[in-house]
Image: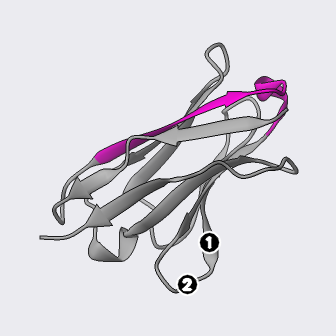
Amino acid sequence: QVQLVESGGGLVQPGGSLTLSCAASGFIFRNYAMMWYRQAPGKERELVASIIYAGTSTDYADSVKGRFTISRDNDKNMLYLQMNNLKPADTGVYYCKGRGLYPWGQGTPVTVSS
């Protein structure tokens, strides 16, 4: 059974940094592209970043380009999201997901506020 457990969220001031982690199990992690999504209060869930199975190609939403970095460790079945220069607009619950896989994890909340 697919299981995704996100961690690393919290409260951070504008301009600060956080690193999110996602522990994956129940599927062959190295075979799947992985993504980070976020859902701000009152808004639709949006795709933030994606990485192909080998980790050699990544893509980002325009709103986070140059500030966020997605990475993976296929030996540890782990997905990461390094977030720098955080802004209040980055506030939301962050979820990791394997392409075509369900269910979603519980997410980890990020709040950017002074």
- The Cα–Cα distance between marks 2 and 1, rounded to whole angstroms, is 9 Å
Q: Amino acid at mark 2?
A: Lys
Query: How packed is label 2: few (under 14 Cα within 10 Å), some, or many (20 or more)?
Result: few
Quadrant location of the C terminus? bottom left
Please provide percent x and percent y for residue 76.
61, 16
- Residue assigned mark 1: 46
Q: In the image, is residue 30 part of the stretch drawn in magenta?
A: yes
Please report contact status of discs 2 and 1: CB closer than 8 Å, yes or no.
yes
Please provide percent x and percent y for residue 47.
63, 65
Taking 18 as reference, is 109 above or below it?
below
Residue 84 appears anywhere in the view? no
Q: Amino acid at mark 1?
A: Glu
Taking 53 as reference, is 69 above or below it?
below
Choose mark 2 or mark 1, whichever is in front.
2
Residue occupying the point 21% across, 57% down: 12
Q: Secondary structure at mark 1?
A: strand
Which mark, residue 83?
none
- Residue assigned mark 2: 43
Please provide percent x and percent y for residue 107.
54, 52
Q: In the image, which residues are magenta?
A: 18-32
Residue occupying the point 46% across, 80% down: 41
Please provide percent x and percent y for residue 45.
62, 73
* Left or right relative to 106: residue 34: right
The quadrant holding residue 54 is top right
* Left or right relative to 65: residue 32: right
* Left or right relative to 20: residue 29: right
